[in-house]
Image (tube, rainbow, N blue to C red):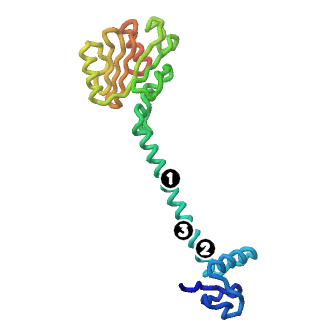
Amino acid sequence: MTAPALLCQYCLHRNSGADSLCAHCGAPLREVGAALLGTAAAATAVGVAPPLSAVAPLVERAVSAVGQWWVTLVGIAALLAAVVTVAVCCSPGLPPIGQPTVRETLPGSLRAAATCGGASQAVVQCVIPAGNGLLFGGIVGGRDLTFSVQVEDPARLSDDVRRWRAAGPAVIADGTLFVAIGPEAAVWYADTRTGVRMETATFVNRVAAQTFLIRSGLAA
């Protein structure tokens, strides 16, 4: 087995493992690793920088440790991003990040007047209290007005609109927006751009329903 290399404790002269004293100055010898650590510690204590050859292994170890921590942090960040993506994509009823909830697709005046159920539900149920200004004049007979709102895929929304048309409503708008008042004076609303579908309970008559459409901002 090869004898370990030794360094002089005083002059750092490199000696073979067979030497008992430094061949350069006669001082005691130490193994290379112990000598470097001792030199670095002593130099730090007195504020003197040790020779580059003495601290190079220490620097290499420090750089390696930093690199390992950096890789670990990047891995953790990637894992967290994956977990968030899976949670958003696989949670039913939650809108994609940056997109409005079902309730937020309603006109501002209607959002302010209504109290709605949880946004995570496929069909959100909302209530406007009888005393709210949108219902002024007894247009729902002094009752609270309930309505449902949801977002549907284009094919299903088209089916709903065809069914509504077949019922013979009073059509207020029939384009990108379909707005109609059903035979029993309920409001039917569909926005083909966003997929939003809304249906209210009945009003006292069709004039009352049309009044609500104008007040709420669902129709001009």
How far across and how far down the image is residue 118, in percent? 47, 26
Q: Residue at x 64, y 91 (%)?
A: 19
Q: Is residue 97 left or right of residue 194?
A: right
- Label for residue 64? 3
Q: Is residue 159 left or right of residue 6?
A: left
Circle 3: residue type: Ser
Residue 218 in sight: yes
Measured along the vertical axis of the image, is residue 117 above or below residue 21?
above
Q: Secondary structure at mark 2?
A: helix
How far across and how far down the image is residue 128, in percent? 48, 16
Q: Secondary structure at mark 3?
A: helix
- Label for residue 76? 1
Residue occupied by mark 2:
58
Q: In 3D space, how far apart are the residues under numbered discs 2 and 1 (Cα atoms)?
A: 27 Å
Q: In 3D space, how far apart are the residues under numbered discs 2 and 3 (Cα atoms)?
A: 10 Å
Circle 2: residue type: Leu
Measured along the vertical axis of the image, is residue 26 above or below residue 42?
below
